[in-house]
Amino acid sequence: MTLKRVEPSVFVILGATGDLTKRKLVPALFRLRKYVDPGTRTFVLGVGRKPELDDDAFRAWLKEAVAETGEAEDGIDQWIDQHVRYHCMEETDVSSCRSLGERLGALEEEQDLPGNRSFYLSLPPSRFVPTIEALGESGLAQSPGWTHLVVEKPFGRDLASAQALNRTVHRWYDESQIYRIDHYLGKETVQNLLVFRLANAIFESLWNRSHVESVQILVAEELGVETRAGYYDKTGALRDMVQNHLAQLVSLVAMEVPATIDAESIRYEKIKVLRSMSTPSATDVVFGQYGPGENGSGPDAGYLDEPGVGVASTTETYVSLRLAVDSWRWQGVPFYVRTGKRLPKRLTQIAVTFRQPPVCLFESMGSCLLHSNVLLITLQPDEGFALYFDVKAPGEPLDLRTLPLSFRYEDAFEKIPDAYETLLRDILEGDQTLFVHSDEVEASWKLFEPLLGGDREVHRYPAGSWGPEEATRHFVRGAPETLQPASG
Amino acid sequence: MTLKRVEPSVFVILGATGDLTKRKLVPALFRLRKYVDPGTRTFVLGVGRKPELDDDAFRAWLKEAVAETGEAEDGIDQWIDQHVRYHCMEETDVSSCRSLGERLGALEEEQDLPGNRSFYLSLPPSRFVPTIEALGESGLAQSPGWTHLVVEKPFGRDLASAQALNRTVHRWYDESQIYRIDHYLGKETVQNLLVFRLANAIFESLWNRSHVESVQILVAEELGVETRAGYYDKTGALRDMVQNHLAQLVSLVAMEVPATIDAESIRYEKIKVLRSMSTPSATDVVFGQYGPGENGSGPDAGYLDEPGVGVASTTETYVSLRLAVDSWRWQGVPFYVRTGKRLPKRLTQIAVTFRQPPVCLFESMGSCLLHSNVLLITLQPDEGFALYFDVKAPGEPLDLRTLPLSFRYEDAFEKIPDAYETLLRDILEGDQTLFVHSDEVEASWKLFEPLLGGDREVHRYPAGSWGPEEATRHFVRGAPETLQPASG
């Protein structure tokens, strides 16, 4: 995470007329200008298949589209006029890619740029392999400066397709050029987690099987499948959330202290965690699918009634897993991992439950309800920490109460920057820490692929509930009341 | 600290016309009635040497005196009328004590009481020995029920006088009858400290030389000697505060986990701590005396200008000590202990500074200012806990900030009961946990007596400052900024 100088470059968005350009990429690139020398310009070359667009028409569409998202800020229209171009082409075609190369060369000459290029694949997964082949074949994997290839998830649908995608990528690119964006969480959040663990000796001292009883990780979504049913019904929560986001979170929580805080050392430790885990047995997994339910303002449709979902779909919208990290540090400590759609609220939390005191000294005083200390790390939406500990309520008889020592980032600091802002900055700076290594992708698929197929029971849960009862009973037993999701 | 039933009893105050009766004892006994069965009455027999008083005149004085202190509550006047008696006598005289016994017997018969008696010595220290002798000689060390003897500090002026006092006491009383009140802190505060350590496994895990770098204990008084100069000038801070209160605080922080939470086990562990310490060498002690100074609203007189202080007095009003607890748990961890009068504010704090992370991983990110985690326990006036930990400020370059996770009792609970209320309750219930054992008194005198005499330098500090510079330089080096008393 060394702070590097951002150099002038061209940011090529393949699939530029999609949502991501207007919602995230262009607003983030605009905001990034404030971290950069005024002379260091980043140009955006939007690439799409709409022949009716030219530079001006694309800019006009973009300005309007950004304004509609509510992401517009003072000066963004002028910035778009000066920094954005459009190039119409079929991105899987080699000769089209050659013409893209010529266009880039011309832009770089015109603007006196050193030839640094990022290629951002904002494309459906089915187009990843042919596009990467065409870019490579046409010579665009190299440039006079640096070339970074940015790939959005999913990285394959299973181990074989992930390996095939990695093989294609590595045919043309070195791993150091690849930026696999797989971050449910932004850089700030990940850094906060690392700093919390590694800058605070007391927590790192407690961060092991001698002191920790269990770890719970919850990624709850309030939304259903929305407009993504076509994609989601073929994917499911295991592929969409567990294999990537939750695997990342488990890795960050469970990893050893890295040798240094750089991309290579951190990714090495994360891979090591994935390799210390085994595929959970069937009894340690519960799948769920939301049925009809109620939210505060009215009824919610069940998953099977969502437009675009197969009538008898058994796609899971909820997964609960009991994972084991068989390392010296964590052997015997269960990692309870849960994610689901249409849960009561959007919430990403890590709960580290410490072991109870070995002796209940307060029994004679009328109280033997010792609780475990719990460290609750909230990553979304209200980032902060809370350490639950027992205090004595005043008076007699002795009455222990569990209360939090708590801290919210928002109370101490300004708003945390948008995840895309920090991720794009890392791409421009050449910092891969927050991006996923090919070995991570494959280790994670190895772990979770066996759960994809076969006979499996998918338990129904009402939309707006905390998931199927089978999972709640199975995995959350013994959790302190403060961690029951209902009060989370 | 087992909760016991309070039985009907007579509470005898020797020295009843003093300040303590109206300011603390009677208001506390009145408030205690709410914890007790309505049929369980506690009678107060005030004993004094003023022949002009009788029951009615004493009650009239008491009602007025309590009202003046602002401690009056609804119903206290009626309560005084029904429960308070006065007995005029010379308490060091055996035949007077015999007449007191007759008076007590008559009261117990009249009110159908079982003969439980507390004798509270609210007397100058010089009268302790003759009064105890007279009580014993006259047979008042025993009664048809239980008999508790309550002695206020100081317990001797040095080891020899403390031993003499203990010998006198033990001639007539069993140690289980003796309640030595030496509590700067009330029961609630001490219990909070014990619960914090022993009900929260993570803190007890960290509570040792492997994780703790230093412990600081500060008992700061804002007031000067006020009206006590005559007593104080012969006493000094070492006798008045260090030998008793600070020794108690060190013991509570440093003690091993007791076998059970009862008086015997806890006092055993506290004595063990005192016996693990050695008298600090001269280089580890700094004495101070306040000179003239300024407070917010005007000048403060220096100690030597206080009425009643000798012109060339070298009595210390400030002591700073570096103590070592040579136990397996604490060897090598310095305990910095400070107390003084005319400091900037009234404040009792324990700061446990944990060791820094062994490796600074964030150096490459522009930040190697790792701080120690600090647990700050505030006992007075605003009881609570704060755990200082490092978080990352949003943005780049990496910027670590030390912030507290904090908790205040007052935010979570109603007001903590007055120290005297809980102490008197313990006396009536027969709970000695919070009272000092004779072995504790003697172990503490053994430790600190060698510092009383000899040639010693007393450094002047301005009233309203945090003590002599010699002490600040000597003992607080390396303390995190949050613990510098100036910001405390």
Image: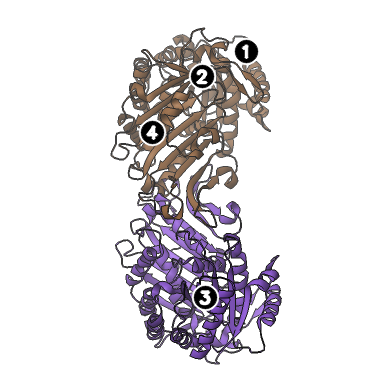
Chain colours: A brown, B purple
Determine crowd level at label 3: few under 14, some 14-19, many 20+ residues with C-alpha closer than 10 A: many
Which residue in the protein does label 3 denote?
Answer: B340
Spatial distance from mark 4 to mark 3, Cα to Cα?
Answer: 51 Å
Identify the residue at image location x=52%, y=92%. B312
Q: Are marks 2 and 1 on the same chain?
A: yes
Spatial distance from mark 2 to mark 4, Cα to Cα?
Answer: 33 Å
Q: Which mark is residue A335?
A: 4
Spatial distance from mark 2 to mark 1, Cα to Cα?
Answer: 18 Å
Labels 2, 1: front one: 2
Q: Which mark is residue A122?
A: 2
Which chain is mark 3 on? B
Expressed as whole percent of the image width and height from the top left, the position of residue A290 reads 52, 18
Which residue in the protein does label 1 denote?
Answer: A53
Sequence-earlier tag: 2 or 1: 1
Q: Are marks 4 and 3 in contact (CB under 8 Å)?
A: no
Expressed as whole percent of the image width and height from the top left, the position of residue A111 reads 56, 27
SS at circle 3: strand
| Callout 4 amino acid | Phe
